Image (spheres, coloured by chain):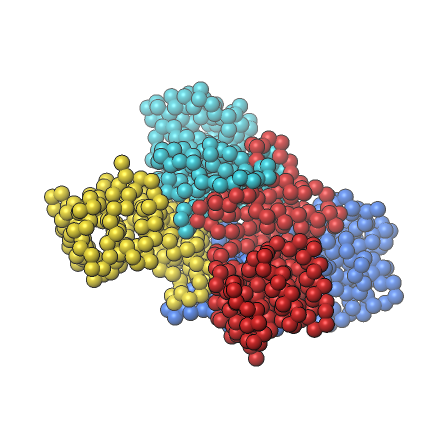
Chain colours: A yellow, B cyan, C red, D blue
Amino acid sequence: MAIKVGVLGAKGRVGSAVCEGVNAAEDLELVAQVDQGDDLQMLVDAGAQVVVDFTTPGSVMGNLEFTTAHGIHAVVGTTGFDEERLAQVREWTGREGAGHVLIAPNFAISAVLAMSFAQQAARFFDSAEVVEYHHPHKLDAPSGTAIHTAQGIAEARKEAGLGPIPDATEQSLDGARGADVDGVRVHGVRMTGMVAHEDIIFGAQGQSLTIRQDSYDRTSFVPGVLVGVREIAGHPGLTVGLDGYLGI
Amino acid sequence: MAIKVGVLGAKGRVGSAVCEGVNAAEDLELVAQVDQGDDLQMLVDAGAQVVVDFTTPGSVMGNLEFTTAHGIHAVVGTTGFDEERLAQVREWTGREGAGHVLIAPNFAISAVLAMSFAQQAARFFDSAEVVEYHHPHKLDAPSGTAIHTAQGIAEARKEAGLGPIPDATEQSLDGARGADVDGVRVHGVRMTGMVAHEDIIFGAQGQSLTIRQDSYDRTSFVPGVLVGVREIAGHPGLTVGLDGYLGI
Amino acid sequence: MAIKVGVLGAKGRVGSAVCEGVNAAEDLELVAQVDQGDDLQMLVDAGAQVVVDFTTPGSVMGNLEFTTAHGIHAVVGTTGFDEERLAQVREWTGREGAGHVLIAPNFAISAVLAMSFAQQAARFFDSAEVVEYHHPHKLDAPSGTAIHTAQGIAEARKEAGLGPIPDATEQSLDGARGADVDGVRVHGVRMTGMVAHEDIIFGAQGQSLTIRQDSYDRTSFVPGVLVGVREIAGHPGLTVGLDGYLGI
Amino acid sequence: MAIKVGVLGAKGRVGSAVCEGVNAAEDLELVAQVDQGDDLQMLVDAGAQVVVDFTTPGSVMGNLEFTTAHGIHAVVGTTGFDEERLAQVREWTGREGAGHVLIAPNFAISAVLAMSFAQQAARFFDSAEVVEYHHPHKLDAPSGTAIHTAQGIAEARKEAGLGPIPDATEQSLDGARGADVDGVRVHGVRMTGMVAHEDIIFGAQGQSLTIRQDSYDRTSFVPGVLVGVREIAGHPGLTVGLDGYLGI
């Protein structure tokens, strides 16, 4: 039987992509599309089992108070969660019969997997570097994802007792060897036409392993949201980060 | 304190690369180099804690009978193990105080990780294909590794209840869509100058994830052998396949 | 001074992308947007120096008869030109003071360059193969571009007197070695999330050269159209194919 | 009829790879292997039509004086040519009946083609960057080849009147955007296991073009040397750089 899904912020760019994704999935049924001004009671009336919330920091807490209290699970991509807010959500989800909550900063499942694989691989290789590629309108370099990836690699190397990454460079043009993130070099390429791409490269004697992630358009969060929708019934309480759902 | 290592088949092409690798590692000490005609007692006299065996099907069983009986661990890349031989080794390693044994068909650690990551990722993507690249002297296509990778993907998809991979192809030149391995398409490229390379590609809405493995020369098995040497003390009995040692 | 540009089929998906591209270019001025039912005289009144025609086989000949007669140059992406039509256009463009015409089947400038480079490189390498990647809704495999690329490589090899591409394959799963296009192997990958991508791979002793073309979205024809608009004044008569404008 | 080839410095690492390459080519015949202490007259006696010189700055001028005077062509990979030496060689090759000379700093034909294609493509794209990958023992970053490539791109952009490459970066970790070579960003990755690799990336609306060059081992100069040997008879006088022979 299909899971009954409600979408909050259904008329927004992101929300409408989620609605399309739910409609296209045979095992999911879109039963409620809620937007600004609508009454949340619609969700209960429609029998929604899971809601997807890509709304605003101003409305998400009210939404979650309602859904947890009504035993509806919530998959949340809305930003603005600090420790205080997470503690409040955790409290709500701890109540008898409460709906579960998944809050994730990144639903691009290929990016989440790439980061997980990078952390698994890091301790087996002498060398590791990250090269990210984005459109030239991006304001920061390197990307937050690339920095986060490099930090994960650095941490895994440290735990395994690995020393510094080998690098005999003596003569260098300024910037040629990239940014140093906890000892892992990170390079940012800015290229008209590209969207968001990342190479995580590991090297050992006679071999290399490259984990390449490509985002081709702005709907790449949809498959990850649908994983959340499908699996949330099995994850009581509050989960932060999609990786907790990937079984890896 | 360094782990004391003996190498069997030390004068062969593979064995001598292992010797170089052990010598280059600060935490390992090469205490015995054994070759045809040498007495295995050398290993005991030298205090070897772990031996590496890249010899021949004709001599490996004798070697393992000796090492297990003397409480010496053995990391084995020699081929020719069938169920009967594995059962015998398992029996030897089960005895009181016996040396441990690791037998692996593939020590290229990047290839072993690539396959493991492919199996982890498979259930989250609509599409999966494998493209392997080798020198043109290779006799079989696709490579055994690529077939094995595709089978692992197919199995993971099946367990997750995924249907067939989408493919609207109606008009096709013969062979254009590759070989069908349990429903996963596999392509073999043959290219002068290349050594051994593999792309495992996964696709979902708006994104793809590619796991790329490159072997640049014939010493790429060395890092995996050294992982085996370092970790075998913690793996009693017989282990088949390096992935059992990777904690993934 | 900016070149004055008119767009035919301006309200269509392709035409409106051309209009945006012209508007975004500092050296071009959009002076007329013509669609079904509009009078072509608009172009003359607006002082258009170049028109872009992405219309239909049914209307393009009338358009070109008008533009050539009025000394307006035309960059044409409309399909359906056979030898008879080309001969007619050639005749029109040969008249005193006639507008020039560029007709191209493919305006994706990266794809046109990739094919040109492939033809230049082919005679210096032992091996050559093509791997193309498309979304899974594509009906044909391999893509027309990939077949065309392989044919160009085969022709260049033949002219240089090269023999067959080396391939020792003896044991093969059906399809593993791709489709045979004039002796060049071509592989088609179908992958959810991807758009249109091509690897043209050349190999020689100890090295390879890969020409990779990525199309990320359906506006990738725009830069090639703008090259046509900017350069057409210097190319009298009829030119077929954008490569004639690339100076390569 | 096969071209008769002599090799100078035949016992050196490079010279012996050249000898193997000549022996493996059906249209070439190895007639003389000359090394330190041998008399150059051997070349004349053996009827050598072309010699290959990978010797030392100390001996190459004497070799070329001899070969040009005897009407033997010379393909030269020896280093140390300044303007004065080139002028001297040019004078020798200008004499009646003199042997031709090709002096090239780089015989890796894939690298020479990559650079040529980069210069041809540069004026058609908004964006261009270079990422090079080498083993971690390399002392300089970025590589000389990558710097040279970036300079060629910058020059081609300037000739075409292109402005600066778009880049909205406001917040950046030091080094993240690579080294600035005449306005083109260049990134150097250092990776155990890799040999020498380069990505030259171009981007325009909705698309990118990547020229990837891989050197897998130290014999990658051989195919370029053989091109020189085969074509030198048609190139009188002194030619500097293999690109002059590639017809591009």
Q: Is residue B26 left or right of residue D138?
A: left
Q: Relative to residue C234, is residue B245 depicted above or below?
A: above
Could you say where residue B88 lies in the image, as x and y percent from the top left?
42, 20
Q: Who's the residue at 39% across and 30% down the image?
A: B239
Q: Relative to residue D33, is residue C179 depicted above or below?
A: above
Query: Residue C9 or D210: which is nearer the viewer?
Result: C9
Residue C29 in view in this figure: yes
Could you say which quadrant of the image residue C225 lies in?
A: bottom right
Could you say where residue C100 lies in the image, as x and y percent from the top left?
66, 68
Could you say where residue B14 lies in the image, as x and y percent from the top left?
54, 37
Could you say where residue A96 lies in the image, as x and y percent from the top left?
11, 43
Q: Who's the residue at 57% across and 80% down the image?
A: C1
Report how many numbered discs are placed on residues in the image: 0
Query: Residue B102 or C72: which is nearer the viewer?
Result: C72
Task: Please state, as top left, top right, bottom left or bottom right, where the C terminus of chain B lies in the image.
Answer: top left
Task: Please state, as top left, top right, bottom left or bottom right, where the N terminus of chain B lies in the image.
Answer: top left
Residue lying farthest right?
D96
Q: Relative to residue B191, is residue D161 depicted above or below?
A: below
Q: Who's the residue at 53% across and 39% down the image?
A: B170
Residue A159 in view in this figure: no
Q: Who's the residue at 42% across and 50% down the image?
A: B207
